[in-house]
Image: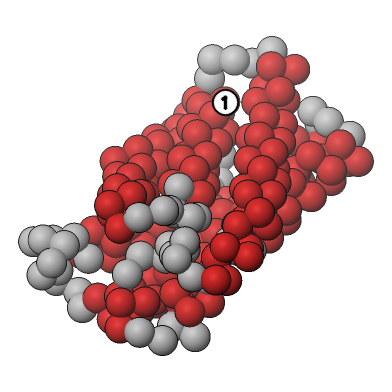
Amino acid sequence: MSNSDATSPLLNNTNSDSSNQNGLFTQYSKHVAVISLLSLISTPILMILNSGNFFSPFTLHPIFQCIAISLIVLSILSLQPTSSGNSKLKAFDKHRKFISYFSLPFFLIGSSAMFYNKFSHSAPHFTTWHSTFGLISLSFLILQASVGIAFTIPSKDSPILPKSLYKYHRLSGYFVLLPLLAITATLGAGHSTWSSTQAPLPVRLIFVDTAAILLVLSIWSGIQKHKLGF
């Protein structure tokens, strides 16, 4: 593995033979990821429409969390693959901005809405697996975003953190944060008390659980192992 592979963003190199051979597979994986994402985020939105409770702190929670997850997925897909050094830098910058400027604030707004909803009803907090995984996911996302920013300040050429740590940032993002978000979304949209009253179990298993699994697997399939340091 070259030094540039170890320190560059997790991007495919279209000059490599393996990338050319896997290009069609990568495109199929992207299509699967987008379809799975649409299923995962549209299901709770349809549940909200079905409930008739459009304007409340409670409904703000799934809406903002769905937007935040969508931004994360789209920012990841923008890195798989890129065609030139310039497009790689643009995709990496887009990835960082999508998460730091938009996704993370949306997660905070959605989480705050649920916290306020619990507070306004004097209901206990963190009593379900969904809420527990949600707190863990949000905490890890803040840490992950902070580390990502540290690779760009004071400049991309001379960051606070050494570029050799890129691969650990990628590893934790793909194999810790992404599954955490998928599990949290599944527990909320597929197996919470609220969701169980909005759609039958077979519908939730297909359009939430299966969609979350396919989303994670399709994103993982776009990873190049040598970019992770293997």
Is 14 or 64 nearer to us in this picture? 14
What residue appears at the point 64 percent right and 16 percent down from the top-left corner?
53
Direction from residue 130 to residue 166 in the image, left or right: left
**Residue 52 position by quadrant:** top right
Q: Tell me where residue 197 appears, x and y as whole percent.
A: 81, 31
| Residue identifier under label 1 | 59
The total of numbered circles placed on residues is 1
Q: Is residue 163 left or right of residue 123?
A: left
Q: Nearer the viewer, residue 49 or 87?
A: 87
Indicate the colouring scheme: secondary structure
Which quarter of the figure has residue 98?
top left
Q: Is residue 107 visible?
A: no
Is residue 7 shown left or right of residue 27?
left
Residue drawn at point x = 35 percent, y = 84 percent: 2
- Helix, strand or loop for disc 1: helix
Q: Alpha-carbon neighbours of circle 1 within 10 Å: few (<14), some, or many (≥20)?
A: many
> In percent of the image, x 63 and y 49: which residue is there?
27
Residue 160 appears in view: yes
Along the viewing direction, whichever of 220 and 202 lies nearer the viewer = 220
Percent position (x, y) of residue 12? 47, 63
Residue at 57% of width from left, 25% of height from top?
Answer: 59
Q: Amino acid at mark 1?
A: Thr
Percent across and percent down for residue 69 are: 52, 43
Instruction: Give percent across and percent down for residue 155.
Output: 10, 61
Image quadrant in which the N terminus is located: bottom left
From what the image shows, is residue 129 above or below residue 227? above
